[in-house]
Each structure stands twice: as C-alpha cells, then as structure tokens.
C-alpha cells in the first residue's frame, strides 16, 4: 500500500464509521475511483481498532460508570445507577451478533453486490429522513424502554446489509421511537462499541489464519489516523446535530447511491 492509499482509507473509515452515511459504500467506491488494489484484511482490522479506540475514549466516563454499575447490579440483583443503560447496550447488541454468526457467508458474498449497496444507501437514507421528520424527539437514552431496545437492536441487525449504515439505521430506529437526535446518536455510538469489537475480533481471527506478511507501519498509521478522525467526527457530529438535523446526510446518501448506480449499472 502507498502512503496516500493508507491515509485516504484511514480517513474514510474514521469519517464514515459513525456518520449515518454507510462506511461500506465508501470503501467500495474509493478503490473504484482510484483504481487501487484491495487494502487487505490486516488493514481493515487496524482501522477498526482505530475507530473502536476513538468511541471508547470519547465515552470513557460513561463506559466506566456503566461497567461499574452493571457489575454492582449483577451482584445485588437490582438496578444500580447506569446499569439499565448498560443492559440496554448488551441486549441491543444480541440481534446483530446472532445475525452475523448465521449470515456472515451471505453478507460476505451475495450482499456485497455494488447494486445492493447502492439501493440500501438510497432506501435507508430516505427512511432516516422520514424518521427525522415524524419522530417526536422527546426522550434521551436514559429513558429507553425495553421495547425501544428491542426495536433498535433489531434495526441494527439490518446493518449486516452493506450500504445500510449501522449508525444510520440505529439512529433511524431511535428517532422513530421518540428519542432526540442527540440521544439517538449517543445510544448508537454506545451500541457501536461491542459491535465493532465483535466485527474486529472476527476479522482478527481470520487474520490469524492468513500467512501473508503484515505491514506494521501501514497498520500503525491506519490505527492512529482512523482514531483521530473518528474522535473528531463524533465530537462535531454531536455538537452540530440538533442544529442541522439529518437532512444533509440524507441528501449525501442519495447522491452517493446515485454515483454507485452510475458506476455499476
């Protein structure tokens, strides 16, 4: 990999992992536009480590409180502080974990079609716009019901379809369930922690089976750049979201889906 390829792909991963615009669509389009070879599994693992470290560090205080309160709740058998939110993240992750185990072969083959990605980018982008328009936006993530958790968790499983956008579909579901924009985004980001950890772990196990030489310098640059970019992206997104809404991301998704259709039809 060239230095330019490393930088561009790390920045793309860091920017698109948490915005509701589909990282998979971008990672398909960038090599097409640039005529670059596949970056390889090792680099994919590296940038996932970068984005995971960014979201964990950004929400480090919340994660520490949730973890501590969850352990206390398990010991005492009752709700403690932020333990309810911790359980919401755990149970909200179950559908995508089960779906990933059962459908990973289908996801890695049939569903990786550029046309599937293009139509998913457009269709779920429009659904995000509808949710943003009609959602009541009255509650925060600390007032999630178990019905909310089930709906958002099942929605996250749809992100196994490339082009859906994990962050986009969970924010869409959160908005439909009456969360504010910021609350939907924050819960989506908290849900991303175990989800990215599982995806990175799965790819890491695949990497262990490979015998190819690992470019540690490329991986190190990828980790650092994707982490810094993702952290800045999370911060700015949460700062600006209530002001700008979801429409700019919806319009971008429609444009991106149109570009994919242009290249692959």
Image: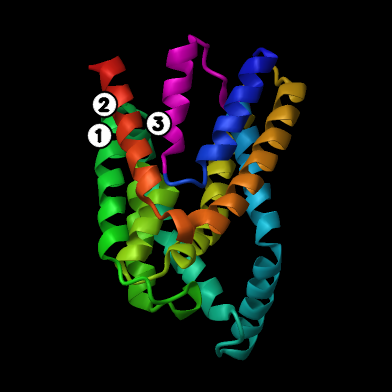
- The tag on residue 115 is 2
Q: What element carries label 3?
A: helix
Number of other residues with Cα within 10 Å of mark 2, as a class: few under 14, some 14 to 19, many 20 or more: some
Q: Main secondary structure of the magenta part?
A: helix
Between residue 63 and residue 233, name the one nearer to us.
Answer: 233
The residue nearer to you, when weighing 256 against 193, is: 256
Q: Which residue position holds label 3? A: 25
Distance from disc 2 to disc 3, alpha carbons, whole Å, reads 10 Å
Q: Check contact, mark 2 vs mark 1: CB within 8 A.
A: yes
Q: Residue furthest front?
A: 243
Q: Residue at left 52%, top 42%?
A: 17
Among the two numbered marks 3 and 1 on one chain, the one whose residue lies closer to the N terminus: 3
* Mark 3 residue crowding within 10 angstroms, few (<14) / some (14–19) / many (20+): many
Distance from Cα at disc 2 to Cα at disc 1: 6 Å
**x and y percent of residue 116 in the render?**
27, 31
Q: In this view, does 42 lie above or below 230?
A: above
Identified at 61% across, 31% down, the residue is 11
Separation of marks 3 and 1 at Cα, in angstroms:
10 Å
* Residue 111 visible (yes or no): no
**Secondary element at tag 2:** helix
Q: Is residue 99 left or right of residue 34?
A: left
Q: Position of residue 114 (x, y in %)?
A: 31, 24
The residue stretch that appears in magenta: 21-42
């Amino acid at each position: 990999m060239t230095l330019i390829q490393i930088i561009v792909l790390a920045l793309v991963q860091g920017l698109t992992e948490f915005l509701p615009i589909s990282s998979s669509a971008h990672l398909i389009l960038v090599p097409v536009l640039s005529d670059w070879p596949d970056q390889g599994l090792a680099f994919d693992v590296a940038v996932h480590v970068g984005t995971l470290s960014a979201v964990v560090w950004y929400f480090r205080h919340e994660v520490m409180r949730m973890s501590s309160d969850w352990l206390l709740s398990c010991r005492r058998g009752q709700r403690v502080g932020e333990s309810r939110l911790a359980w919401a993240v755990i149970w909200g992750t179950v559908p995508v974990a089960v779906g990933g185990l059962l459908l990973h072969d289908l996801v890695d083959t049939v569903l990786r079609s550029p046309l599937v990605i293009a139509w998913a980018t457009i269709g779920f982008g429009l659904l995000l716009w509808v949710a943003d328009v009609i959602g009541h936006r009255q509650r925060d993530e600390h007032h999630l019901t178990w019905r909310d958790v089930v709906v958002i968790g099942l929605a996250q499983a749809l992100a196994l379809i490339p082009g859906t956008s994990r962050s986009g579909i969970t924010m869409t579901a959160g908005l439909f369930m009456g969360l504010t924009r910021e609350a939907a985004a924050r819960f989506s980001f908290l849900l991303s922690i175990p989800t990215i950890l599982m995806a990175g772990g799965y790819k890491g196990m695949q990497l262990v089976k490979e015998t190819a030489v690992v470019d540690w310098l490329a991986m190190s640059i990828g980790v650092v750049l994707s982490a810094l970019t993702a952290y800045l992206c999370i911060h700015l997104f949460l700062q600006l979201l209530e002001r700008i809404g979801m429409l700019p991301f919806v319009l971008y998704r429609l444009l991106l889906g149109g570009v994919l259709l242009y290249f692959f039809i």
